[in-house]
Image: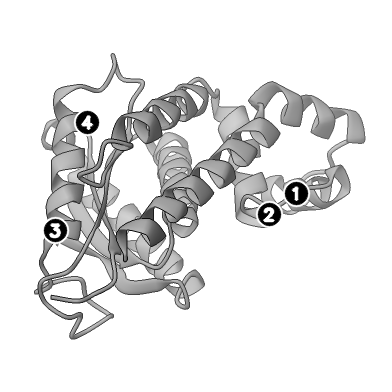
Amino acid sequence: MTDELSIALIADIIASKKMTKRAQIQDILVSILSDINQRFEADIESNLTITLGDEFQGIVGSIETAFLIIDLISLDFQLQTKKQWGEEVTLRWGIGLGRLSTPIKNRKISIGTDGPAYWYAREAIESVHQYDDYGQLNEKISTAHETDDFFNSVIRLQNVIRNDWTTSQKETAFIVLNTCGYDELTNQLIKSAMKAYLNQSISEQTVSKRLISTHIKQYTHSRRLLAEKIEERRRQLDH
């Protein structure tokens, strides 16, 4: 068993078996995961890998990276499926914080590694499946510690904000997160990113309205602070 606590992610497509375009949807997911694995190569310890047709898993280096990956994949997946078929496809996520019983032998594929980190992630995603707060909850963390309830109460509020976004607001949020992550942003930077993403000019006023309507500054600030608190817990449990 490894000494350090690892962060495992498990995700699956909600109601995938009812979908008529499963193959096409999985193709979109494969492409998104490939891009994320390349972009976060330095922060991903074991690549996000599809283990079943509608499920994938991986090991990441930090909680902030885990949150950002969840946000980027979730939004990109919803936007692409909406654009191609007129209906958003949503993911549910489980985050597990624990040790690994077996070492990571091949970081390119997250298969063959096991341990409490994955067990907790599985516990978390199954809990989301059983209780999704009327469709408002898409992710949960499990650390086998009493602080789980506090962490998950904040995640639930963050999910409510994210799930309340319209398609155009999701575009704005995706552009912000894709450009700045959880760092401080400027309107000029987002204006340039929006122009490139939407392939059209955007006024300063429109940028301001979009940022205000999404509450994206509050959202990213909350995600960053929560990640810091969970990392503090991770360091305490490491000793």
Q: Which residue is mark 1?
A: 184
Indicate which disc residue 116 carries: 3
Would you say 72 lies left or right of 132 here? right
Above or below, comparing residue 4 to residue 94 in the picture: below
* Amino acid at dot 1: Glu
Q: CA distance from mark 1 to mark 3?
A: 35 Å
Q: Which residue is mark 4?
A: 128
In percent of width and height, residue 149 lies at 31, 29
* Amino acid at dot 2: Cys
Dot 2: element = helix
Q: Residue at x 22, y 56 (%)?
A: 56
Residue 61, image quadrant: bottom left
N-term mark: 4 or 2: 4
N-term mark: 2 or 3: 3
Dot 4: element = helix
Q: Residue at x 14, y 42 (%)?
A: 123
Q: Which residue is mark 2?
A: 180
Would you say 84 lies left or right of 188 here? left
